[in-house]
Amino acid sequence: MSVVAGVTMHFGAIIAVLFLVGILYILSSTSCSQLMKSIGEKKQTLVKLDKDSQRAKAEWDGMKTPEGISAALARLGLKMGTPSHAQVVRLNSDGTPRGGQLAVIRAKKRVDTAQFKRKR
C-alpha cells in the first residue's frame, strides 16, 4: 500500500469518527433538550398542584372554625349551637367517660328511668 493511500485511509477514518461523534452529539443533545422540556412541564404541574393543595387546605381549615361550622349548618337549614358546659362529655383514653361529669350523670338517670319504666 502506498503512502498516499495510507494517509487517505487514516484521514477517511478520522473523518468517519468525527462524523459519528457529531451524530451522537446531536442525538444526545436532542434527547437532553426533550428531557429538560419534560422536566419543566412537570415542575409547572407540580407548582400548580401545590397551589391547589394549599388553597384546598386553607378552605378546609376555614370550614373547621366555629364560624365555618355555623355557616355550613345554616346552609343546610340546621339550627345548632355550641354545647353548654353541662352538655360536654370528656372521655378517657380508653373511650370511657370521665367520672363526675354532669352530662354523664344526667344520661345515666335517663337510662335508669327508661329501664325502670320498661320493667313495669
Image (cartoon, rainbow, N blue to C red):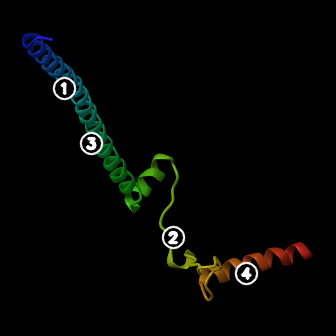
Tell me the quarter of the picture where residue 11 sits. Answer: top left
Q: Nearer the viewer, residue 12 or 100?
A: 12
The disc labelled 2 sits on which kind of residue? Pro
Left or right: 99, with 22 as reference point: right
Instruction: Give the labeled residue for mark 2.
Output: 83
Instruction: Give the labeled residue for mark 1.
Output: 25
Mark 3 vs 2, N-terminal side: 3
The nearer-to-camera label among 3 and 2 is: 3
The disc labelled 1 sits on which kind of residue? Tyr
Instruction: Give the labeled residue for mark 4.
Output: 109
Instruction: Give the labeled residue for mark 3.
Output: 47
Q: Residues within 10 Å of mark 1 (few under 14, many from 20)?
A: few
The disc labelled 4 sits on which kind of residue? Lys
x and y percentages locating residue 15 in the rendered image: 13, 17
Residue at image point 51% right, 48% down:
77
Tell me the quarter of the picture where residue 44 sits. Answer: top left
Mark 4 vs 2, N-terminal side: 2
Marks 4/2 in contact by CB < 8 Å: the verdict is no
Measure the C-alpha gap from mark 1 to mark 2.
73 Å
The nearer-to-camera label among 4 and 3 is: 3
The nearer-to-camera label among 3 and 1 is: 1
